[in-house]
Amino acid sequence: MKNPENYYLHIGMYAYSPESVQEFSALPQGFLEATEGLEQLRIIEHGYPILVGIIERSFPGVDTAEDYQAFVERWKKNNE
């Protein structure tokens, strides 16, 4: 990365109603989602809005069972 100050780290937090999940799952995968492997691009490609925000710092991701366990341990430590 030549100028990392020009980039943002994506931190995904998703919240869907049951109806939205059913509607989303019925939509066909588009070119961008297939190319990038990011399911939120399906929503955008089909014209649905998404809400984004900018935060001051990043946090460790929770993508595996091990990540989740590490999160639980951090949460317990910080909430004793």
Image (cartoon, rainbow, N blue to C red):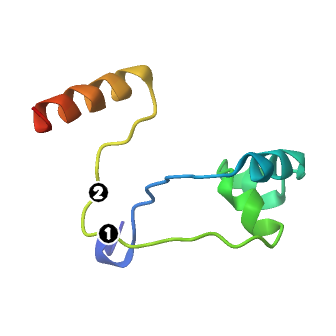
Q: Residue at x 75, y 61 (%)?
A: 43
Q: Which residue is mark 2?
A: 58
- Under mark 2, the amino acid is Ser
Considering the image in quadrants, where does the C terminus appear?
Answer: top left
Distance from Cα at disc 1 to Cα at disc 2 = 7 Å
- Residue 62 occupies which quadrant of the picture? top left
Left or right? Give the position of 47 relative to 38: right
The spot of residue 27 in percent (x, y) is: 88, 52
Q: Position of residue 3 (x, y in %)?
A: 32, 75
Q: Residue at x 42, y 21 (%)?
A: 65
Is residue 26 shown left or right of residue 11? right
SS category of the residue bearing label 1:
loop
Secondary structure of residue under mark 2: loop
Please provide percent x and percent y for residue 57. Answer: 25, 62
Sort mark 2 into few (<14), some (14-19) or many (20+) by Cα contacts within 10 Å.
Answer: few
Asked if the residues shown at circle 1 and circle 2 are in contact, with their CB atoms under 8 angstroms apart, the answer is yes
Q: Residues within 10 Å of mark 1 (few under 14, many from 20)?
A: few
Q: Looking at the image, which is closer to me, 31 or 58?
A: 58
Tell me which amino acid carries mark 1: Ile
* Residue 70, position as x, y percentages in the image: 27, 27
Name the residue tied to disc 1.
55
